[in-house]
Image (cartoon, helix red, strand yellow):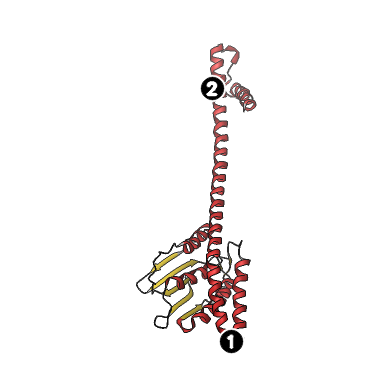
């Protein structure tokens, strides 16, 4: 900055001589000092303003990047916590179902193990993915639905109706499994009150809708699963997750991501 100020000051003096034909030799020392300092102060302030602006923008960018990184780490921690909570409970229920069908229907038991393996393999494969093809998520959802329908029988009805042209879109991983698990966790599933879940596409979103028949739960839901899906979609910047609850139904709308 010092080198620039001296050079600019000398340059402005020369420019002033050429344009205004100022005879610096005729100026008094005080006038010469004022002229020289005015140019120097102007140049210095200009350089400081440019430097501080660049520095401020760089610091702002770093702050935003650090904030986004912390958000992603927090979301990954939440997702890992969800896996830790869901997997043992989910595995326990499915092993009980498997033990009950092995004596009566060994062929169905083999298919049950294959579908269970498919679900767990998917959980491991998408651990570090921000989004995956909708087709892959729906394939795993069908495997997950097979396990649930084997477990609950006619007490649960899962209908997946998504047109082929939507399958090349992307979606945040494990979102559909989390929503399906939430539907079962918070609603009655019985022969008197069968649970019906519909998965379909509408206006660039994927909707998961179930009839509402809440359980009488002692502990209120933490909502961590749904909030995790919301935050991951928000970080991808592709729209907001919308939740609609009426007296008879509960619907979650997840934005689909362009491939």
**Number of numbered callouts drawn:** 2
Q: Position of residue 209 (x, y in %)?
A: 44, 73
Please tell me which residue lies in front, 247 or 193.
Answer: 193
Please tell me which residue lies in front, 247 or 94.
Answer: 94
Q: Position of residue 237 (x, y in %)?
A: 52, 58
| One can see residue 152 in this view | yes
Q: Which residue in the protein does label 2 denote?
A: 38
Mark 2 or 1: the one toward you: 1
Q: Position of residue 145 (x, y in %)?
A: 53, 77
In the depicted structure, whether residue 32 falls above or below residue 134: above
Q: Position of residue 124 (x, y in %)?
A: 62, 66
Split into 4 quadrants, where in the image is the N terminus?
top right
Neighbours of disc 2 within 10 Å: few (<14), some (14-19), many (20+): few
Q: Which residue in the protein does label 1 denote?
A: 103
Secondary element type, mark 2: helix
Split into 4 quadrants, where in the image is the C terminus?
bottom right
Please tell me which residue lies in front, 10 or 165.
Answer: 165
Tag shown at residue 80:
none
Place residue 193 in its image quadrant. bottom left
In the depicted structure, whether residue 185 falls above or below residue 27: below
Residue at horizontal 45%, vertical 68%? 252
Place residue 54 in its image quadrant. top right
Q: Earlier in the sequence, mark 2 or mark 1?
A: 2
| One can see residue 206 in this view | no
């Amino acid at each position: 900055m010092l080198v620039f100020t001296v050079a600019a000051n000398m340059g402005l003096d020369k420019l002033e001589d050429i344009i205004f034909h100022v005879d610096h030799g005729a100026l008094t020392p005080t006038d010469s000092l004022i002229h020289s300092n005015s140019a120097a102060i102007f140049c210095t302030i200009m350089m400081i303003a440019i430097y501080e602006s660049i520095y401020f923008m760089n610091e702002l960018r770093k702050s935003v990047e650090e904030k986004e990184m912390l958000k992603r780490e927090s979301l990954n921690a939440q997702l890992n916590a969800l896996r830790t909570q869901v997997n043992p409970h989910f595995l326990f229920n499915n092993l009980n179902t498997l033990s009950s069908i092995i004596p009566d229907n060994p062929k169905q038991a083999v298919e049950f193990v294959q579908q269970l393996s498919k679900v767990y393999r998917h959980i491991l494969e998408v651990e570090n993915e921000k989004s995956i093809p909708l087709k892959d998520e729906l394939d795993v959802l069908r495997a997950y639905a097979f396990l649930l329908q084997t477990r609950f029988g006619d007490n649960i009805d899962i209908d997946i109706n998504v047109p082929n042209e939507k399958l090349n879109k992307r979606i945040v991983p494990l979102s559909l499994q989390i929503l399906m698990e939430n539907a079962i966790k918070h609603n009655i599933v019985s022969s008197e009150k069968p649970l019906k879940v519909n998965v379909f596409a509408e206006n660039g979103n994927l909707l998961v809708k179930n009839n509402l028949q809440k359980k009488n739960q002692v502990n209120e839901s933490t909502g961590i699963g749904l909030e995790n899906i919301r935050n991951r979609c928000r970080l991808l910047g592709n729209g907001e997750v919308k939740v609609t609850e009426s007296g008879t139904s509960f619907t979650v709308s997840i934005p689909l991501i362009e491939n």
